[in-house]
Structures are given as C-alpha cells and as structure tokens.
Image (cartoon, rainbow, N blue to C red):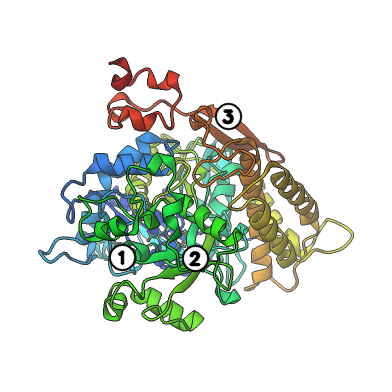
C-alpha cells in the first residue's frame, strides 16, 4: 500500500488564482471546511500577471454603459458562440464583484471625481476596465489573499486554529481526481519539494487551474499552465467544449528570443498606442471586417478623435477584438512589412508624453527596459502574436458551475463556454470573480445536499501513485525518452500546425505527431529521486498536455469554418450553420472523441437586445424567424 498523507475537507479547490480564491472564500463563508491547493507558490498564479484591468459596466467614465451593452460586446467578441446564460450572469454581476473587492480592501485607480476609473479595451464599446495602473491582477490576488487571512483570523478567534476552516496547500500538484462510483470523492497529488504523496478526501472539488499555454512554443503563459484541470476533468468523465478556440494575443514581445511571447498589455493600445508596419503605416484600417465596419473608424483623424470624444466618433481599429488584430499582424509580417525581428511596431512614444507613459504603463516601461533594453517613452516596441488564453474548457452548468460529474465544479480559464470563440480583454478577471463565487456556492449547496460522504477506493489511490512514479521505472522498452525533448516536439507541432492559421493537412500532421509522442510516453524516463525533481514533474505534466493538445487538434480539424480563435486557411469564412454547433470532447481513458452538440437558442429577451441587421451576419434565416425584426 502506498504511503500517503491524508486530509479530509468538504471542498477542495484546485488552483489559487482569482477563480480558486474567490470559490474558496464563498465555500468557507457557507461554513464548509475548504482546502486550496496550488502547484506553485501561493500568490503566484496567472491572475497576478493580469495587467489591463477587470471589465465591469459600472458606467463611471461613460454613463451610457450598462450590463446589456457589456453582454452585447461579449457575445459579439465571441462571435455569438458563447454560452449566453454565462455571458448574461457575467455582465450583470461583474460590477458587484468589483465593488465587493473594494470591501475586501482593494483600491482601484480613481476618476477626478473619486469614482473607480475605467479604461478602454478592445471590443468594449465604452471605457469599462477598472484598473490599478497596469498591475490590476496583483491587486486582485493581494486582496483575495487578504480576505482569506481575515477569515482565518475569525476562525482562530472562534476555534483557536487559524486553519480550522480554510487551509492553503502550496507547491502541491494534483495529478488525479478520485471517485466513488460516478461521484467525486477527492483528489490525489504530490508535494513538489519532497515528492511525497497527498490525498484529499472530499465530496466536492472545484477546478480553477487556469490555461493550457505551455503546449505551444510561443506563449505568454508560465510553467504551471499545462492543462492539468482540463485533463483531470476529462479523465474523471467530464466533458470539454470549444477546445478549438485558442486566443493568440496580438501583442507579445518578439525580441530577444529568451523573452519571446511575454505579454505586452492591450492597455498600451487602450491608452493611445498604435500599430505600424515597417513603412510606418497604421495598417489596422485595412483590416476592419465587414461585421465591424459601422463601429470602427476608417481613417486616422476619426480614430484619434475617438480617444477624447468617444460618443462622436467610431473607435480606433487598433482596438478590434484580439483575433482580428492577431490575424492582421500575421498578414503584415507574411507580406514582408514586419519589424526586424518578425513582428510589427507598437508605438506609444510618439503618442503620449514620456511622463504620462511612465505613470500609466509602469510595468510595460520596466519590462521593455529590463528585458529588451528598449525605452518605450522614446522608441516603438516590436510585438507579435503569442498563445495567451484558451476559450475552451470544462463544460459547466452556468448558474452553479457544475461539470457533468457529480461533485465536480470548474471556474475561471479552465471552464468553457463563457467567451465563445474569442474572449475580450478584461473579461477574464471579471469571469474569475463571477464564476469563482458561483462555483464556491454550487459546491457548498451540493455538499449540504448530500446524505452520505463518498469514499475513494484504496486501489484507485494505489493506481494514481503507480502512474505518478512510472517515469522512474519506464515500461516502454527500447530507447529511453527525455520529457524535455517530447515537450519541445509537442510545443513545436502545436505552434506550427495548430497555431494562429490552420489547414486540414497540417492539423492531421499534428495529430500524427501527437500519436507518435503518445507511443513514446511509456518510455519516458527520469533520473534521481522524488525530492524536488523538475524532470519528473514535467513527465507528469506531459500526460495532460498531450491529452489536451489532442482535444484542440481534433476539434480544430472538425470545425470547417473560421471564427474567433480558430482560423482555417482552407475554410476562411464564418459559416452561419456552424455557429450553433459545439464540439464536445470526452475520453474513455484511451481514445479522445469529439461529438457535436447544438447550442441552446438564446432567450428571447436577450436575443432582442440585438438589431436584426447585426444578427443576420451570424445567424441562419431559420434561427432569425423568431426575432421581432423578422416577425414585423
Ligand atoms: P490562474 O490565475 O491561472 O491560476 C491557476 C492556479 O491553478 C494556479 O494557482 C496554479 O498553480 C494552479 N494549478 C494549475 N494546475 C494545478 C495542479 N495540477 N495542481 C494544483 N494546482 C494547480 N485577463 C484579464 O481579464 N485582464 C488582463 O489584464 C489580463 N492580463 C493578462 C496578462 C498575462 C501575462 C496573462 C498570462 C494573462 C492575462 N489575463 C488577463 C488572463 C487572466 O489573467 C487569466 O485568464 C486568469 O488570471 C486565469 O485565472 P484562473 O483563476 O482561472 O487561473
């Protein structure tokens, strides 16, 4: 029998980014004993890296803003493939979640009259991103952590133990979910430092593990983002949706090579920065798609006037949704009009006084100075697309964040549906808080409703341990494989063959490569012991990256159209008959299957928030028959 440290909780939250912490706070506030488990240090999650801000229609800078406008922008950004109920809950609840953060101790930047300041961002009709300079994620995480500490102090006063009701397990990686029949019974993992195993017995698990970017070579994501939550959910019997939609953020650093992919916030463009090609031309005016023509300026004068008079002018196309800008940059580089290191120029230095740039964009100023020796107050940056965010994720019930497996919940980037085919900037931080809270609540209600606690079988725990240590004793026979080599081959294929522009033949090549890597996995070998051993950690992460990459590639091959974060060179247009078809991934443990599932039709009152003329660009005639514009 495997030696395992055991803990019993009501709810185990896997992930300590914004979604995980907000879920944990909610579960604890409902009186449940809650564990928060995170792979890296407490406080070091992607959320902390979020720069631009959190989208919420507070209407502080433009009073025309409201939840309906935010809802419309989100659906447009996602090209109407979003789960509309999630988009509705998100738009309605985001302002309350921002206010709530201030009650926890956050302090957002202010307007002159003392209200929370809001900045422009791509795809948002009005200035909507509440921010703290360009370090909003840091404030969000700091505040949620502070709230957890204050709850722990209450628990200490009541029980004498700080960790009586909420405890953080940092640098602890979950490798398997445990079940009792069809229900969740806990989670299994290891301490990164000692390599010792740990088991959580709990009837409810909230997945809040973030993204999958490390499967791609050029990415803004850091080492933890290996799709663990996506893979854990799949293996436990849950489903993933929208996995073909990957967001390539248009502006990542391109030089020097060691920092390629690191994010350059959209806030640079929101605050006045513009994209130029090697001829010095502001090329985005050439790339305004038909569906956005009436909303974006087609000349520099109007685009520049919009910054000071947004009601009287159309917005600058530098702030089109991310998928549009990323494709435009890709086309300019391909046409030979790129910057010396294969990107384009992002210029804020000629647009704002140096002092203002340092005040509004302190992190960007510091990042370029330190990493590229570029002073952004004096010269343009070089930028290009980088794999940033996965729209696809665990299929959840919108109101409760429940996955298809009883006892399993998911929130934040690991959950799918909310953003459809493309996420708007700033909509992630709000998503984390809205659905993190709902997941914590969903889990609490689920646990309260149970009459018997589930229990994991010892044989499942032994199997999880055996699987984890396999790289120390590979079974493949023949040549031993190095996990770093396999990882690098996977990243290169995903980048080159299932990247920003896709073709059927190339996706098939990627799938063949994934099959080949899968065949080599049993031979993956690592040296040394279980004590802090990054090679072993990567070997375990590889199982997840391969499974999730296969989902991305299989779904990408099936979707024969281009929409949001899925561009098919061989099917360039958006096809109305694909809009309401969701691709759902599942696995029986060996094979990944992808099945089609129809999108539930939008509720009538929400449908009517859009002009018929706009919907005609996305919907089929049959679907539009119910709209009052057609009935009339
Ligand atoms: P994360 O914050 O990613 O946290 C995931 C957690 O899960 C971590 O604690 C990790 O250690 C843990 N974890 C993962 N796997 C395991 C495992 N197997 N076992 C245990 N723990 C595990 N969005 C915006 O809205 N506005 C912005 O301005 C913005 N800027 C961004 C800038 C950068 C550089 C990046 C990378 C992203 C940005 N985003 C932004 C996106 C946004 O930050 C993320 O989508 C969001 O923070 C994800 O939050 P999350 O809570 O889902 O997960």
The quadrant of the picture showing ligand 1 is bottom left
Picture disc at residue 277: 2
Residue located at (35% from left, 18% from top): 626
Picture disc at residue 254: none
Instruction: Confirm or deny contact between disc 3 and disc 1 (CB under 8 A).
Output: no
How far apart are the two marked residues, 1 and 2, measured between alpha carbons?
A: 19 Å
Q: Residues within 10 Å of mark 2 (few under 14, many from 20)?
A: many
How far apart are the two marked residues, 3 and 1, measured between alpha carbons?
A: 41 Å
Q: Which structural element holds mark 3?
A: strand
Instruction: Confirm or deny contact between disc 3 and disc 2 (CB under 8 A).
Output: no
Q: Which residue is mark 1?
A: 271
Q: Residues within 10 Å of mark 3 (few under 14, many from 20)?
A: some
User: Farthest left residue?
Assistant: 113
Question: Which of 334/488 is in front?
Answer: 334
How far across and down, in percent of the image, does residue 596 sit? 58, 29
User: Farthest right residue?
Assistant: 478
Residue located at (68% from left, 66% from top): 536
Picture disc at residue 596: 3
Beta carbon of the mark 1 residue lies under 8 A of ligand 1: no
Residue 465 position by quadrant: bottom right
């Amino acid at each position: 029998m495997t030696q395992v440290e055991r803990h019993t909780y009501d709810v185990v939250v896997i992930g300590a980014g914004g979604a995980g912490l907000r879920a944990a706070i909610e579960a604890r506030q409902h009186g449940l004993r809650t564990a928060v488990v995170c792979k890296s240090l407490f406080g070091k999650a992607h959320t902390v890296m979020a720069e631009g801000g959190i989208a919420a229609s507070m209407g502080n800078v433009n009073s025309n803003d409201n939840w309906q406008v935010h809802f419309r922008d989100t659906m447009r950004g996602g090209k109407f493939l979003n789960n509309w109920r999630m988009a509705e809950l998100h738009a309605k609840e985001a302002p309350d979640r921002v206010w709530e953060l201030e009650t926890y101790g956050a302090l957002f930047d202010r307007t002159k009259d003392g209200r929370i300041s809001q900045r422009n961002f791509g795809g948002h009709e009005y200035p909507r991103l509440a921010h703290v300079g360009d370090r909003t994620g840091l404030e969000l995480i700091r505040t949620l952590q502070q709230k957890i500490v204050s709850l722990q102090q209450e628990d200490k006063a009541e029980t004498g133990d700080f960790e009586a009701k909420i405890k953080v397990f940092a640098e602890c990686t979950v490798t398997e979910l445990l079940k009792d029949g069809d229900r969740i019974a806990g989670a299994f993992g290891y301490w990164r430092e000692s390599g010792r195993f740990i088991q959580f017995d709990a009837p409810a698990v909230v997945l809040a593990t973030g993204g999958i970017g490390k499967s791609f070579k050029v990415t803004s994501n850091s080492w933890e983002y290996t799709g663990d939550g996506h893979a854990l959910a799949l293996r436990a019997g849950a489903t993933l949706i929208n996995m073909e939609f990957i967001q390539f953020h248009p502006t990542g650093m391109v030089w020097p090579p060691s920092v390629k992919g690191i994010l350059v916030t959209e806030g640079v463009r929101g605050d006045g920065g513009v994209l130029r090609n090697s001829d010095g031309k502001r090329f985005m005016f050439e790339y305004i798609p038909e569906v956005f023509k009436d909303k974006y300026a087609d000349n520099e004068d109007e685009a520049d006037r919009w910054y000071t008079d947004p009601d009287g002018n159309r917005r600058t196309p530098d702030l089109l949704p991310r998928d549009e800008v990323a494709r435009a940059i890709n086309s300019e580089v391909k046409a030979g009009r790129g910057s010396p290191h294969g990107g384009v120029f992002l210029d804020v230095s000629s647009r704002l006084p140096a002092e203002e740039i340092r005040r509004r964009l302190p992190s960007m100023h510091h990042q370029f100075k330190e990493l590229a020796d570029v002073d952004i107050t004096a010269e343009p940056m070089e930028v290009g697309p980088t794999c940033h965010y996965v729209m696809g994720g665990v299929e959840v019930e919108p109101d409760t964040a429940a996955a298809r497996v009883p006892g399993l919940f998911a929130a934040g980037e690991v959950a799918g549906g909310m953003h459809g085919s493309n996420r708007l900037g700033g909509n992630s931080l709000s998503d984390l808080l809205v659905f993190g809270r709902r997941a914590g609540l969903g889990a609490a209600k689920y646990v309260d409703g149970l009459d018997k606690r589930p229990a994991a079988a010892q044989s499942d725990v032994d199997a999880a341990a055996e699987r984890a240590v396999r790289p120390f004793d590979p079974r493949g026979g023949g040549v031993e494989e190095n996990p770093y080599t396999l990882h690098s081959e996977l990243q290169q294929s995903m980048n080159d063959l299932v990247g920003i522009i896709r073709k059927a033949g190339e996706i098939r090549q990627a799938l063949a490569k994934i099959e080949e890597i899968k065949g080599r996995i049993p031979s993956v070998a690592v040296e040394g012991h279980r004590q802090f051993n990054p090679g072993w950690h990567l070997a375990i992460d590889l199982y997840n990256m391969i499974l999730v990459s296969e989902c991305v590639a299989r779904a990408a091959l099936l979707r024969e159209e281009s929409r949001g974060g899925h561009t098919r060179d061989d099917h360039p247009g958006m096809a109305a008959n694909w809009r309401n078809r969701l691709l759902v991934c599942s696995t029986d443990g060996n094979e990944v299957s992808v099945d089609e599932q129809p999108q539930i039709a939008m509720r009538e009152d929400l449908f009517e928030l859009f002009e018929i003329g706009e919907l005609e660009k996305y919907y089929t005639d049959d679907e539009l028959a119910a709209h009052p514009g057609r009935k009339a």
